[in-house]
Amino acid sequence: MGKGNYTILARIISTVLYTVGLLTLIQGCRMFRKEIRNRQCRLYGICAFFSALWSFSFALMWNSTNPEHARIFRAAGMIGVFLLFVFITAFMTHYLTSHKAFKNYTRVVTFVGCALWPFIIGPNSVTYFSTKAGMSYTFIPNIFNTLYNIFCALIGLNFFILLILMRMQAGRKRLRIVAGKLAICCIVIMIGMIFDTLLPVFGFTAIPTSTFTQGIGVLMVASVLKFQLASEINIENISKYVSNSVSTPILFFDEKEYLSMENTGAREFFGMIEDDLKQSRLWELFSLPVDCLTFKGDKSIREAECKINNRYCSIEINRITDEYGDTSCYIVIINDLTEKRDYIVRLQESERKAESANIAKSNFLARMSHEIRTPVNGIIGMNEIILRDSTDEKTLESARMVAVSAHNLVELINDILDISKLEANRIMLNNDVYQLPDLLKEIKAVAEVRTRTKKIEFKICIENKVPVELDGDEKKMRQVLMNLVGNAIKYTHQGSVTVSVGSVYTNGEFFLRISVKDTGIGIKSEYTDKIFKAFERGEGAENSGIEGTGLGLYIVKNMLKIMNGTISVKSEIGKGSDFCIEVPQKPIGSTTFTSLETAPRKSDKELPKINIHIPDKRILVVDDNEINRFVAAELLSYTAATIETAASGRECLEMVKRNRYDFIMLDHIMPEMDGIQVLQKLKTMEGNMSSKAVVIILTANAIQGAREDYLSKGFDDYLSKPIDIVQIENVLKKYCASSN
């Protein structure tokens, strides 16, 4: 039958097949060019090409009038058939993250199909004949056609197994949706094969339905692929948003944890990324445990530390998921901690050295305190003996001035020690009830002695209703006021120094407000913050020749901070300064005063009376300093006790073998044998007649924590120099009362 004898149906069938083939080819080219770096798109482009080859070849065969030509066209079409199934199987297999055995199985089936191809298209396999609808064919029964039928069945089984495995991919919702869409595509392709592939096997005339349905199926696969690309966040898409100019090393791993891409910073960090490095899994590359990719809950970031190329690093693993929660890729950010780690090591070393320096400084200050306090103890003690025994008013006046100067020296020593205490955060509040008028009178007495030589007027003004008794730390308040008043007098050459005392309630809390105002040289505005720092003083010619350590205001500010108080300053060059402090205190009782003259008098500032009389007690004073021995003996003599002295620890040990003593007062630092060593000997030596004596450390060591330290070493009690007769009396009373 000639070509011209074909009915319009043949032309319609040919046109449909040409159209389907053309649409498939166009779609494949578009996907291939658009996403050429995407493996799935490349595979789809190849599938579309062979689908188009199938469609075009069978359209030409169907429109052919010569059986030999038909055989050639069908042979070309069968190439498209076989290779289409090869690549569409590869397309679907790509979605599997495991099942290596099945992947190998599909390769075997594909190989078998390709091996059968020459026999299936051979001259003894198919009979061609013309119909009104076009050229058709039927199979000649033989072994090759049987094998071809088996091949077709295996292809269908391949699709079925692939779809099941895709649906079984745990935790990948997007993949299950893709599998469902591909199932529809496979059903469309396989239905067509029933009519033009299986019917000729049983002797029926072939109908080119599979050529049409496979084209439609391949076009449908394009929509599946577009869905995947729209819903999947892949590395290529992410990389568009990561600039290679970023110096931080960034690595991209695919959903199977294989290295896929790296930025410029990563290439500089690792050097050249070798092929074997790219084959490494994420945890293998960084020597991490496999569970490093186990993200609990909704967290999508894991952090870890590791060593890479002899550099200490922290890595941040970011899991990127699509809209269905499936892992699309991993982004690893590397932070080089080598310099930071080295800095921390250096910082720790600096801190260690600083701590050693602080310890050395504290030890130095403690030593210097002891060395200075020892002679000062002699001065204060001898002066107190004069004050107690002398009746000459002129002598007494001089002795009082010596006492003030000596106590000022002690306060300076305390300031130096307080620096060490402040820096070590070892100063604590010691609140107790005290008399504000007595404190102010003490401040006034010291100030009047200092202002006498300068002809400066010193006055204290008190506002109405200032409480007489307060609960607070009297010692720190005295230290703050002494420093402020001392500074005001030091920098004032003429005029006055005025201390204004008042009170204020803030949020229901009582604050003691004290202002120290002078008419001195003033402070430049740029120095008002610096003056509260250690060893800082205002600079300029106005300060030249004025002695000072630069510690007073530093101690003031920190003491106020401990007491939850504040300080402010107003100053003008050439006109003077006004320092104002506010300190929370607790009023006791309702008694108030407006002046020191009208204030209730708790006690006169006279020498304390000794109210203990212990003629039956024996006291041994051990000190290598002769003056200190004399002072201690003289002051203790007012107790009527028997007083003996020893110039060394060795002499003390010899004396306790001959005499029984009720109290032994030991100096700490002595040559040959210090006080602690003497104490240890006293506790262990045989023939000690004073084994039950109360051993008291009498030392110039007055640093924070000294009392607790000495008591822990076995001393019964602690007394500091300069000797305070009241403290000695209290200690003696305590142990005499306990022995009665």
Image (cartoon, rainbow, N blue to C red):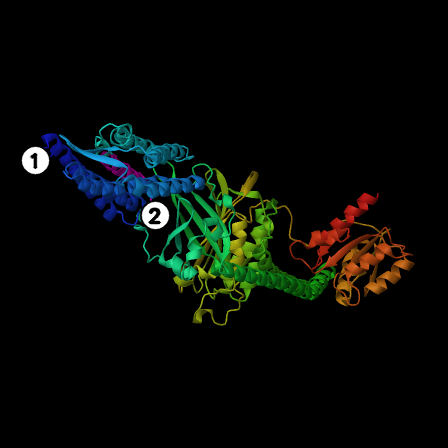
Q: Nearer the viewer, residue 330 or 351?
A: 330
**In this view, 45 is above or below 416:** above
Q: Nearer the viewer, residue 542 or 646?
A: 646
**In this view, 275 is above or below 131:** below
User: Would residue 222 be counted in the magenta stretch?
Assistant: yes
Three-letter amino acid code of the residue under disc 2: Ile
Q: Nearer the viewer, residue 59 or 503?
A: 59
Q: Which residues are magenta?
A: 214-235
Q: Is residue 173 visible from the viewing direction of this image?
A: no
Q: Earlier in the sequence, mark 2 or mark 1?
A: 1
Q: Quadrant of residue 402?
A: bottom right
Give the quadrant of the C terminus: top right
Marks 2 and 1, Cα distance to the nearest angstrom? 57 Å
Q: Quadrant of residue 685?
A: bottom right
Task: Mark 1: give few (<14), some (14-19) or many (20+) Cα within 10 Å.
Answer: few
Q: Which residue is mark 2?
A: 235
Three-letter amino acid code of the residue under disc 1: Gly
Q: Secondary structure at mark 1?
A: helix
Q: Secondary structure at mark 2?
A: helix
Report x, y in % for residue 637: 80, 57
* Horizontal relation, residue 202 to residue 666: left or right: left
**In this view, 97 is above or below 491:** above
Report x, y in % for residue 345: 54, 60
- Majority SS type along the magenta span: helix
Q: Which residue is mark 1?
A: 4
- Give the residue drawn at x 72%, y 61%: 381
**In this view, 636 is above or below 141:** below
Give the quadrant of the N terminus: top left
- Give the residue drawn at x 79%, y 67%: 672
